[in-house]
Amino acid sequence: MRKFIPVAEPLFEGNESKYLVDCITSGWISSVGKYVTRFEEDFAAYIGCKYGVAVHTGTAALHLALAALGIGHGDEVIIPTLTFAATANAVIYTGAKPILVDVEKDTWNIDSQLIEDKISENTKAIIPVHLYGHPCDLDKILEIAQKYNLAVIEDAAEAHGTEYKGEKVGRAGTISCFSFFGNKIITTGEGGMCLCNDTVIAEKIAKLRDHGMKKDKKYWHDEVGFNYRMTNLQAAVGVAQTERIDTFVMRKRENAQLYSSYLSDVEGLILPTEKEWAKSVFWMYSILLKKDHYRITRDDLIASLKKEGIESRPVFYPLHKMPPYKQNGLFPNAEYISVSGLSLPSSVTLKDEDIAYICKTITKYLHT
Ligand SMILES: *Cc1c(COP(=O)(O)O)cnc(C)c1O
């Protein structure tokens, strides 16, 4: 029997253990310690932002970004309907309402052409999500945001190292949010970070992360904040992972290239695109089964692959279909992608022969 191939698996072959042991032996295991600051500085420098504020999840990063901009009850925030639920949840935590927009057929990202229609006098921000590691069309989104005086919060949870027109994503928005969950490009177990270039916003985020405590007056609170701090242990892993990030991004892109070379001749499959202005990190290599092309469904394929020791996942359900986020409107692209799409194993630990085996197995089942 072949080994099991998971959809995602972290790789710790750098200084992770060394830095963790340093935390333990020095006693700095909580959220005070040198690795937190170092991780913030290193990761912000990698993306090309002035400030990084590390928090305990990507969801917390999104929540703090919204809170720091004063978004709350009565406000509306525009997000794509095809994303992980965290994007919407963070908006709802603040009391604001997520307004859902359909995605583009090819990039699976928020369709900038549809945004203006959804803007009302209550709209305060747009959250473009760089889904599966492909960048959104940021210029268009920034243009709309400027026209209507809206903030842009980039959800870059799946896009560490992704580039838009030669620049890393996470630099263009008012604030950008990253996740370091176990299956993301780099991981700290659980973890997240807000990045920005504005001193006032960065300080506000840092304050809200720590119960709203005043920076220069210990135990004095003039607003209610959260405990969203990252531990030194998490940050120690983050520093080591950041040292290796270029290799991870390269491996992800090599995986994608290999997948595409094996699958490009398979009729009835739609492979992930990379626009000419984009550098995708292919966080999860995700494909579509053309409508009515095969006898088997997407879910059949997932089940068959599982029998062969290959884990795969359906693409996210569109938010507008699920009870907490239900919304009227037409979202044909998100619905099509969600029914027909699946994510294939995408770890940086994959061997070339694993990818060959996965593609051979897919082809076998599609043609039965
Ligand atoms: C993973 C993810 C998040 C949330 O990150 P957590 O660290 O799991 O809280 C937010 N948005 C998107 C698009 C994600 O993929």
Image (cartoon, rainbow, N blue to C red):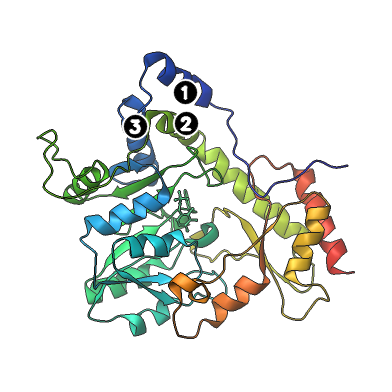
Taking the view exactly as shown, the residue that stands out farthest to the front is 323
Mark 1 is surrounded, within 10 Å at the Cα level, by few (under 14), some (14 to 19) or many (20 or more) other residues, namely: many
Element marked by disc 2: helix
C-alpha gap between disc 2 and disc 3: 10 Å
Percent position of residue 240, x then y = 47, 30
Mark 2 is surrounded, within 10 Å at the Cα level, by few (under 14), some (14 to 19) or many (20 or more) other residues, namely: many
Percent position of residue 318, x then y = 53, 72
C-alpha gap between disc 2 and disc 1: 7 Å
Question: Which residue type does callout 1 highlight?
Answer: Leu
Q: Which mark is residue 237?
A: 2
Q: Where on the picture, by quarter, is residue 69? A: bottom left
* Residue 1 appears in the rendering: yes
Q: Is mark 2 within 8 Å of ligand 1?
A: no
- Kindly check if marks 2 and 1 are in contact, taking CB atoms under 8 A apart as contact: yes
Q: Which residue is mark 1?
A: 20
- Residue at screen point 47% across, 44% down: 180
| Between 176 and 273, the one nearer to me in the picture | 176
- Residue at screen point 44% across, 34% down: 238
Residue 290, placed above or below residue 193: below
- Residue at screen point 79% across, 57% down: 305
C-alpha gap between disc 1 and disc 3: 12 Å
Q: Is mark 3 within 8 Å of ligand 1?
A: no
Q: Which residue is mark 3?
A: 36
- Say which quadrant the N terminus sits in: top right
- Say which quadrant the C terminus sits in: bottom right
Query: As drawn, is 195 to the left or to the right of 360?
Result: left
Q: Where on the picture, by quarter, is residue 24? A: top left
Question: Which residue type does callout 3 highlight?
Answer: Val
Percent position of residue 228, x then y = 32, 43
